[in-house]
Amino acid sequence: MPGGIPRAQPPPDDLPRHPLWRFRRNPLRRATDVAQAWIGIGLLLAVLAAMPGAMFLIGDTAFRHYAHTARHQAATRHQGTAVLLHDSPRHPEPGSDEEKRTRYRVEVRFTDRLGHSRTGRVDVRPGLPAGSTVPVWTGPEGGITDPPMTAAEIRSRCMGWAIIAALAVALAGAAAYGIAERALHRRNLAAWDTAWARTAPRWTTPT
């Protein structure tokens, strides 16, 4: 074949295969195929074993953090009463479920924990007339703030962090498998090139 040895062409990777083909004995199975299969199983077992521990560790750490934050908020925040300075807008669909969920931001006047009269803006129900009273929470500096976190909010945030921890473990396992697969694939290509360099000269014809 004129022009030197043609480039090796490894078989395509999208051929239909049985899910457990790497464990089946056949003349074409390579050592790297078996290694990749066992690496996959090992990483899967490692992920399944590490996931509950990571969820508990991260969830417990988040619970301690948010519980401490909630105690600090309860000790430094004060609940009082504010008076609307303006009417809150009326909802276009009175009596609807949407009206029950809707809140409008309205300016109010309130007294902070030090007895100072202050103004701020809070979310209130639609249709409240000026002069209506609404509960507000004030922070250490006297400004309007959110109420302290409840136990339900703490649980919800802890569950969110636990789910993130589980996803992180799964992604780490997938990344490790991807790195191993690429390394084995490069090794296969190198072995294929070496084998083709020995075989190709027999297919060439003198010119």
Image (spheres, rainbow, N blue to C red):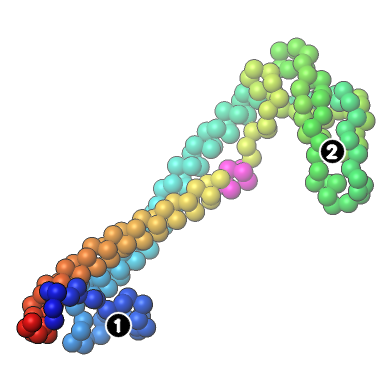
Q: Secondary structure at mark 2?
A: loop
Going by the numbered disc 1, the residue's amino acid type is Trp
Q: Which residue is mark 2?
A: 125
Between 108 and 6, the one lying in front of the other is: 6
Question: Residue 154 in magenta?
Answer: yes
What mark, if any, has residue 21 been given in the picture? 1
User: Residue 118 sits in which quadrant?
Assistant: top right
Q: Is residue 78 visible?
A: no
What mark, if any, has residue 105 been given in the picture? none
Where in the figure is residue 44, as x and y percent of width and height? Answer: 34, 66
In the image, residue 88 above or below residue 116: below
Give the label, 1 or 2, closer to the camera. Answer: 1
Residue located at (6% from left, 83% from top): 206
Residue located at (81% from left, 43% from top): 102
Where in the figure is residue 104, as x and y percent of width and height? Answer: 81, 36
Q: Is residue 179 visible?
A: yes
Q: Is residue 104 left or right of residue 21?
A: right
* Magenta stretch in the rendered image: 151-156
Q: Name the chief secondary structure element in magenta.
A: helix
Q: Is residue 183 left or right of residue 121?
A: left
CA distance separating discs 1 and 2? 64 Å
